[in-house]
Amino acid sequence: MSTSTPLLVFAGSTRAQSLNRQLAAVAADIGRDAGAAVTHIELADFDIPLYNADLEAQGTPRDVVRLKELFFAHPAWIVCSPEYNGSYTALLKNALDWASSPVAGHPEWQDGLKPFRGKVVGMLSASPGALGGLRSQSHLAPLLVNLECWLAPKAFALGGAASAFDANGQLVQAAHQERVRAVVEQVLWAAGRLHAPA
Ligand SMILES: Cc1cc2nc3c(=O)[nH]c(=O)nc-3n(C[C@H](O)[C@H](O)[C@H](O)COP(=O)(O)O)c2cc1C
């Protein structure tokens, strides 16, 4: 059922050695292994300014529209959320805020929820700390629900992440790999059913 489901994977960090970017790469590989059509994006590749309604009034940036299009095109998402001060990053919030902001008068994007509604989202996080960024997920969850996403019940917070990956970016512990796999597979399973043709 999950075969060829379009799966979008991204992390809320642009740091070169980002643990969450590494985790996103692992999740993307797992998605491909499961037969999903994976699109793994980097927020660094999107030229998105800090949200400002006055700026927006001059025209929604092209890369915001590109992000809306990508969100809309993928029924299943994996989001890898770093934790800053017990919450998710400003980078992630800014991207989601822009993507959810209606484009006045635009035939496709005047509905701000359109890129989000009905998406099945699996949350992952990674942190050097013991809780693995779990608190970022607790803040991200209501934001996503507010945007009418469906959250997968399974989620995973990778604690001690600074030593969790090998030099090739693979997870060292099989148990961690299985936790990520469980989230990805549940997201694909649910998206396959929720988005099945009527
Ligand atoms: C401003 C700031 C606040 C942070 N707050 C937390 C925190 O509350 N909990 C936590 O586990 N790690 C915290 N960290 C550490 C991050 O988890 C760590 O830098 C992590 O590597 C960031 O994710 P990334 O590797 O994907 O960029 C914080 C880091 C910064 C820069």
Image (tube, helix red, strand yellow):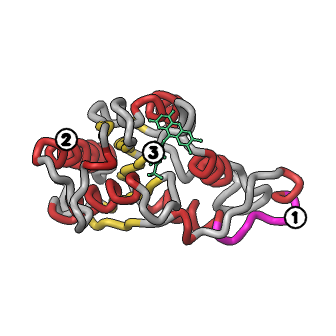
Residue at disc 2, CB closer than 8 Å to ligand 1: no
Mark 3, Cα crowd under 10 Å, few <14 / some 14-19 / many 20+, is: many
Q: Is 36 drawn above or below residue 133 in the view shown?
A: below
Is residue 139 toward the left or the right of residue 54 in the image? left
- Circle 1 or circle 3, nearest the eye: 3
- Say what amino acid the circle numbered 3 marks: Ser
The stretch in magenta equals 57-63
Residue at 17 percent across and 49 percent down: it is 177
Disc number at residue 140?
none
Q: Secondary structure at mark 1?
A: loop
Q: Which residue is mark 1?
A: 58
Residue position for label 2: 179
Structural crowding at the residue carrying mark 1, measured as other residues with C-alpha within 10 Å and reported as few (<14), some (14–19) or many (≥20): few
Q: Amino acid at mark 1?
A: Gln
Q: Is residue 20 left or right of residue 110?
A: left
> Which residue is identified by label 3?
81
Q: Position of residue 127 (x, y in %)?
A: 39, 42
Seen in the picture, residue 32 relative to 182 is either above or below; the reply is below
Q: CA distance from mark 3 to mark 2?
A: 16 Å
Secondary structure type for disc 3 = loop
Residue at 55 percent of width and 71 percent of height: 45
Q: Nearer the viewer, residue 1 or 178?
A: 178
Q: Is residue 191 above or below residue 166?
A: above
Q: Residue furthest front?
A: 163
Marks 1 and 3, how far apart in space? 30 Å
Tell me where residue 73 sits by quadrant: bottom left
